[in-house]
Image: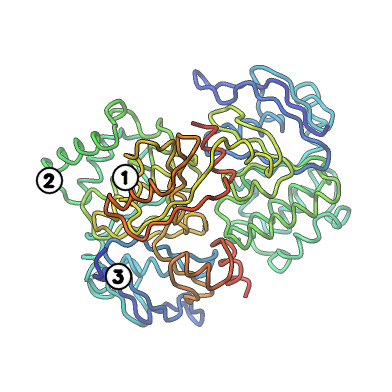
Amino acid sequence: MEDQSVIEVEGLTKSFGDFTAVNAISFGVKKGEIFGFLGANGAGKTTAIKMLIGISVPSAGKATVAGFDVSTQAESIKKNIGYMSQRFALYDDLTVKENITFFGGIYGLSRTRIKEKTAQLVEELNLHDVVNELVGALPLGWKQKISFSVALLHDPKIVFLDEPTGGVDPITRRQFWEMIYKTANNGTTLFVTTHYMDEAEYCDRVSIMVNGRIEALGTPKSLKAQFDTDSMNDVFLKLARG
Amino acid sequence: MSITIDNISKSYGGLSALKNISFDVKKGEIFGLIGPDGAGKTSLFRILTTLLLADEGKATVAGYDVVSDYKSIRNSVGYMPGRFSLYQDLTVEENLNFFATIFGTTLEENYDLIKDIYVQIEPFKSRRAGQLSGGMKQKLALSCALIHKPKVLFLDEPTTGVDPVSRKEFWEMLKRLQQKQMTILVSTPYMDEAALCDRIALIQDGRILEIDAPQAIVKHFPKRLYNVRADNMYGLIQSLRKYQHQYSIYPFGEFVHYTDQRAEFKKKELQLYLEGQGLNEISIEATAPTIEDTFMELAK
């Protein structure tokens, strides 16, 4: 892992009227790091992420993502990040191949590049038998692997993953984490938001937001030591319950 | 027995959702159905709550047959489906009154049962259900499922999408309901919640892998399990996979859970092998298997 920052956040704040949803948060994320961004419902996670991906303008503070300023260069950020969530993944009524072509086109890849990428994904994920199947007919685990690969089509510097492994069976889930480790190993940064603490255990470092502030930041190991417990769930409960 | 299930099978077209499922749930028991999406949990719930007919097999709930006595079952059970199914454009209070009226009762009559839960959402009683947060919706749905004082409560993934604090509170509520002799069948994809049930069934692809108390399930794990870590997780996984004596390798948070093919595991040998692969900060420690480890071994 290189010590190069790909996300730098300083005093980032977002207010709605007199309600401060995100209150002066500061942190950095390195190249190739798997960074967990945790918080209870309503803690301000979603608002913070919307600012980081360039779809919400901060009220105060600064942030750069992939080297671009979130306030003034939002369009450049969108071209340099990938996004995958369980809720929005792929189009069920398109085939695997059609989905890849569609998203490749959205990201501005050339026809030749889309062809190359499709062939590469078919090989890597062993999609030979399903490439012309409708995505809706595939098991959830497959959909997740394909949608993660689609989020990587344009070789983004950072991929945002929103609760990436919720609901899948334990074995598929671990295959998915292997894909994440591999991607991080290649130098891509993974920004994982989740409120499932067992997902948090896989991250290199995690931050925990409570009422708009980052109340804890460190490796899962150091946070567990700091709060004198052996599970991230307990760390979270101790923080959130005060 | 509060629930008896005898050889239930169900297919949708050519797709088999449940294959010869049999188990019983005792009165006052919290029984967990633990399995991933698509395992068949919801199909089973729908059969037991008389919303779906099984292709084969028999089942009873609160002593009534799910086919011939379906009307009696509907009066005796509370059902909280996985998808939020209350009226989004009615307020909290209107939803509760609506469900109470349907069952010929009132909020006041069974207030005692839902009091603990309802007080937490009462400040928002004139808010529309669609405007509530995830945790609040879940509490309202549980209140509505309890309003007619059911004998058996069916909760299909009640904590999916809910944060750890609300999840913990939710389980505390279930424990209190249990003290009132209510039988609870609850499903979850989260293995950590399994430990909170009296007994659990591990389910995958429509089959039951194992049924036992959570503390007993882990005894079905057949091997010695080791926590292995190193400075490079991806490198560690790749190296372990190539190791000739490996039996299973699963990333598990900050560790890899490792089992060895041999009866006599040689820690030093693995340590040297990993060092030879260029890994640093290696540690190998014995650890106790979790429900999830057991699930993966059984599902293999």
Label 1 crowd (10 A; few <14 / some 14-19 / many >=20): some
Residue, disc 2: A110
Label 1 is found on which chain of the structure? B
* The N terminus of chain A, quarter of image: bottom left
**Residue at mark 3: chain:** A
**Mark 1 on the same chain as mark 2:** no
Q: Is residue A184 above or below residue B19?
A: below
Relative height, residue A201 to residue A209 (above, below): above
Q: Amino acid at mark 1?
A: Gln
Q: Residues within 10 Å of mark 2 (few under 14, many from 20)?
A: few
The answer to whether tags 1 and 3 share a subunit is no
* Kind of residue at badge 2: Ser
Question: Badges 2 and 3: C-beta atoms under 8 Å apart?
Answer: no
Image disc number at residue A7: 3
Q: Is residue A152 above or below residue A239?
A: above
Residue shown at 38% from the left, 39% from the top: A143
Q: Locate residue A205, reporting x and y percent.
A: 41, 66
Label 1 sits on residue: B238
Q: Position of residue B148 (x, y in %)?
A: 82, 46
The answer to which image quadrant residue A117 occupies is: top left
Q: Which residue extends farthest right?
A: B109
Measure the C-alpha gap from mark 1 to mark 3. Answer: 29 Å
For the residue labelled by badge 1, is the local secondary structure a helix, a strand or a loop? helix
Which amino acid does the dot numbered 3 rest on? Ile
Does mark 3 fall on the same chain as mark 2?
yes
User: Helix, strand, or loop for circle 2?
Assistant: loop
Disc 2 to disc 3, C-alpha distance: 28 Å
Between disc 2 and disc 3, the foreground one is 3
